[in-house]
Image (cartoon, grey):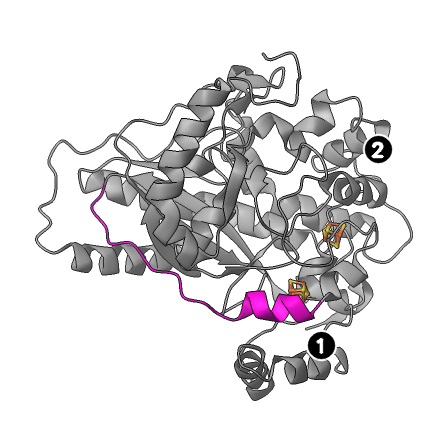
Amino acid sequence: MADNPYWPANRPPEEERAEKLAVWQEKYAASDALAGIETTGRFEPFSQRNDMFNRAFWDEKINSAKTDAFFASHRVAINPRRAEGFRQKDFALRNASWAVSNMLSSRAGKHGKREGFNATIDEGGPVCPTKVEIDDVAIMTTEIKKIARLFGADLVGITDFDERWLYEARVDARDFSPAEHELPDGLSNVIVMGHAMDYDLVSTYPSALASASAGLEYSHETGIVIQLVTYIRNLGYNAVGSMNDTALVIPLALKAGLGEYGRNQMVITPEYGPRVRFSKIFTDLPLLHDQPEPLGVRQFCDICTRCADECPPNALPYGPPEDNKPNCSTISGVKKWSADCEKCFGYWSAIGSDCAICMRVCPFNRRGNNWRDRLFQKLARSRFRHLAAWWDKHSNRAQRLKPGAWWKQQ
Ligand code: SF4
Ligand code: SF4
């Protein structure tokens, strides 16, 4: 490992890095422009060891009794209190929603793997030795999207395997040392799937109850990813399932045309706004790539600071996107809105559950099934965005649903 524990483990010499960067900038210039991605001369792939969930274990600056309690409480050691949304039944629901995902992520723990989080999902059976013939790649692409939806994906997009977003190294969960990827060569396409979180549960953030909306989708995506991987392998092509592991999913979701990047660090989708989790499948199945289209989110975020205003620890930025690093948990050399993850995770540990206030209050977080939401979308994505922002601010759309009221809803 390099002397500086925050540096990528295998950082190449400066000359080699610059050469690689020049190749990448040329290779990805056109697709980056479409996806709204802007890299700078400081770009280098992100090391998973530096993300907050790993630093919370190995970095003395982050690790504390509170962070240990935060993780322990997701299994059994819950610490209920009298506040609505943090009672025993709230934690019980949160932990139950994670159960399927936990089953998968814990089974290879003795090998240092948390499948779906720091290692790919080792499931799906062997690849059939006979390949199905593909006469028309467009038809295969349509079919794969149909099957992904059949298994339960809410959104599906396809992009190329862009090596810049692979973690520079994954993490061995036994000692948090950097570990090699085990991704086979030749998986040139990435299927990115979106999993919409429950609107009412998200409305109760911050609370342990609200966190069930995240756990539920992690558990759902576990099954969806394994089923689609199995389908592709039965067609005779290789496929490897992945959730938060192996590569940063946000740039892949942007490149797959699923949405546009917002100030709250989330992909804002036309269908669900920021209320979406993403999974991915690396495959050599021939597929057509989606082309991102501008949605007007960037322009709207330029005039809106709702997420930053409402963030309790002031972790979100004001002003335009920048290539800055509040700390090592942000990737280097990408011009974007970046949260201070240390402040954000500090708040999560303090309340004993995750927070997504910045998701709840975002004006794009809507059910989408009524005329008001449809009209908002139209206005927000047009030159009338100031009117849309004013209208949202003066409505009660972002109001927190009291956890007690959620429990009483029929
Ligand atoms: S999750 Fe909560 S603490 Fe973190 S940036 Fe969003 S609002 Fe702030
Ligand atoms: S709350 Fe406003 S600034 Fe933040 S992501 Fe949503 S639209 Fe953008």
Whether residue 122 can be seen here? no
Residue 90 visible in the snapshot: yes
Under circle 2, the secondary element is helix
Residue found at x 37% / y 52%:
31
Q: Nearer the viewer, residue 410 or 164?
A: 164
Q: Position of residue 94 (x, y in %)?
A: 69, 48
Q: Which residue is mark 1?
A: 397
CA neighbours of label 1 inside 10 A, class few (<14), some (14 to 19), many (20+): some
Residue 172 sits in quarter: top right
Q: Nearer the viewer, residue 115 or 182?
A: 182
Q: Relative to 93, is 304 above or below?
A: below
Q: Position of residue 355 (x, y in %)?
A: 74, 51
Q: CA distance from mark 1 to mark 2?
A: 33 Å
Residue type indicated by callout 2: Lys
Question: In which quadrant of this rendering is ligand 2 seen?
Answer: bottom right
Could you say where residue 407 lies in the image, as x and y percent from the top left? 75, 65
Q: Is the N terminus in the top left, top right, bottom left or bottom right quadrant? A: top right
State which region is magenta: 285-304
Name which residue lies at 60% across and 13% down.
Answer: 2
Numbered tag placed on residue 66 in the rendering: 2
Which of 319/278 is in front? 319
Magenta highlight: main SS = loop
Q: Is residue 176 magenta?
A: no
Q: Quadrant of residue 326?
A: top right
- Where residue 405 sits, quadrant-wise, is bottom right
192 lies left or right of 323: left
**Residue at the location (43% across, 36% down)?**
164
